Image (cartoon, rainbow, N blue to C red):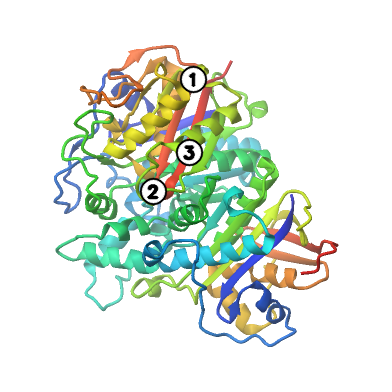
Amino acid sequence: MRAFVEGVGLCGPGLNGWAKSRASLTGAEPYQAAPVVIPPCELLPANERRRMVATVKLALAVGIEALADANREAADTPTIFTSSSGDGETVHQILETLASPERQISPTRFHNSVHNAPAGYWNIATQSRAPSTSLCGHDYSFAVGLLEAMTTLTVDECPVALIAYDLPYPEPLHSVRSIDSQFGVALVLTPQPTSGSRWSLALEMSGGSAQATPMENPRLEQLRQGNPAARSLPLLAALSRNIATNVALDYLGHHQINLSVARVAQTDER
Amino acid sequence: MISRLCIVTGLGAGLAANLAGLRRDMTGLKPCTFDTVTLPTYVGEVAGVDDTVLSPDLAEYDCRNNRLAQLALQQDGFAESVAAAREKYGDDRIGVFLGTSTSGILQSELAYRRRTSPDPLPADFVYAGTHNSFSAADFTRRYFRLTGPATALSAACASSAKVFATAARMIAAGLCDAAIVGGVDSLCLTTLYGFHSLDLLSPLPCRPFDVDRAGISIGEAAGFALLEKPDRYEGGDATLLLGVGESSDAYHMSSPHPEGLGARLAMTRALAAANLSPDKIDYVNLHGTATAAGDASEDRAITNLFGLDTPCSSTKGWTGHTLGAAGIVEAIIAALSIEHNVMPGGIPSTNIDPALKSRYVVGARDAAIDYAMTNSFGFGGANCSLILGRAR
């Protein structure tokens, strides 16, 4: 399967947007971890923004960045959201409440607890009635989402925005499910080359026990292993370089997704 | 092509029990006595879930949701069909695509209850195998020793309808030759108290489309379908998956669009995918949860698209709203209606709301159904319509 990348969104520790992060991903500049800064969402009115939980803020921020980078209308673009977990703080608060004698859950908290809350807010914010799905593959959530994106654009012949995000749980869930830092990434993909295409991706599956491509920088490698959405980092590093690169991502522990990444020649060198 | 089905709902275990309930207008709902819940509501609780024992090598997946999944997988010759498909295609050529909204969060609820804050959770609590949304999909592929593609889809109450689209694409893209699709959702305090907080729980068994409808009754269920490419299928009669339509409401997180715009778009896209005009649809299994706003919104969408003559009903009064499993449960009911020439009635509604104009079928009746549509709409404005048809 083949796809073309038009735009990227990125938000992680010391990774403040795709444009500013490319040099650290290639190693041209030293990577420096720093607290995650999620840019505010301008698309929703203030009262809706206040109801947004962290997962929603992160997913919307990277999605909006990627669509803007691709210069593509969000309302017409099908979306695939993927994450290992729902909003950790929301789930924790509900579980605490249910363990208490009162059991009075807040209705807003309840609707924010669904796994597809970011997709719901996204479609309201962008006024998109395009198909949208919300997936989970535990540690392999990014690879699961990427495969869904590739099959969707191939079979349905449409552009797709893939939005992956994962945030840490608070305690006590953190001790049983450790997710490091906050990490969100979005890719705008098309089945055919467009005037906005910047990279081509060719995907092949393979079985066996080949290793996923690691990050050279030890701190980025630690991030890759510690956050399911950050399993995308080797792909992002490949996109940052201007040479053809092969990347392998683990898929469900028994397969690899092998990606051949190549720069698409174009006049507009953004 | 749907070559095998299996199901467990509050109506019973297996297709025959569910079909019998369907023919006799029986309900699987009863007053809620689940766990320590003290809400005045009815639930579709599955009998025998706690007696289901997972094999020791799958112990890390042990929770109500996966016990319910296994109970369904043991019905209706499903495991035998999967074994045959595994032999035919290979273990890495069968995908597993499951929808869930609750997953095994009950396990976390019980773990939090056993814990004294700020202590850690009990040592026997396994997050990945129970609470995580991928748990049921992971359990199912391990149960059948499959290594094809696998995905958990969690888009609230549209989850296990949307998996049909994922599976169809995966097969079309050549990533697998067959797929197990389905969904599992189990009773838990999060959904019971959550819908209670929204004032959406009915104190009586839910009455979809009734003038006195007062909200939903929550149910639990597991259902699975084995999908194969028609050109590789070697059995007898089977039901066809003809079209899937997906859309988003872009309106509100927990209320449907008042005019049913998203719902109508999903149905329109399903008809286009199936290459059928609305008048070809013999029966629509409604989402019909029995909330005031939800039924009104769907009624608008139905009458705008189909007019006033297409028979439709909601089967939430038999099974309850099984949330993340509603899509597969009602896809299976649609398949049964085609296979057995029976149009399900929308019990226990008797006094249909005169403001709702759809042709709502109250009691089960015999009818030849060649094409059936089933609707699933969820929180976050996630909509999905499926069209099933008789193989000819």
- The structure residue drawn at horizontal position 45% and vertical position 53%, both measured from the top left corner, is A120
Front one among A205 and B198: B198
Position of B47 with respect to B89 (left or right) is left
Position of A258 with respect to B119 (left or right) is right
Instruction: Provide residue B246's location: percent of width, then percent of height.
Output: 52, 40
Say what amino acid the circle numbered 2 marks: Phe
Q: Residues within 10 Å of mark 1 (few under 14, many from 20)?
A: many
Check the image and name the residue furthest to the front: A45
Instruction: Provide residue B237's location: percent of width, then percent of height.
Output: 54, 19
Gap between marks 1 and 3, in whole Å? Answer: 16 Å
Q: Residues within 10 Å of mark 2 (few under 14, many from 20)?
A: many
Mark with earlier residue (1, 2):
1
Residue tagged by mark 2? Answer: B379
Instruction: Provide residue B157's location: percent of width, then percent of height.
Output: 39, 44
Residue tagged by mark 1? Answer: B281
Gap between marks 2 and 3, in whole Å? Answer: 12 Å
Mark with earlier residue (2, 3):
2
Quarter residue B40 falls in: top left
Residue tagged by mark 3? Answer: B384
Q: Residues within 10 Å of mark 3 (few under 14, many from 20)?
A: many
Badge 2 and badge 3 both on one subunit = yes
Q: Find numbered disc 1 in the image and state the secondary structure of the residue it sits on.
A: loop
Badge 1 and badge 2 both on one subunit = yes
Say what amino acid the circle numbered 3 marks: Cys
Mark with earlier residue (1, 3):
1
Chain of the residue that carries numbered disc 1 in the rendered image: B
Q: Find numbered disc 3 in the image and state the secondary structure of the residue it sits on.
A: strand
Determine whether B241 is above or below A198 in the image: above
- The structure residue drawn at horizontal position 17% and vertical position 52%, both measured from the top left corner, is B37
Instruction: Provide residue B254's location: percent of width, then percent of height.
Output: 35, 49
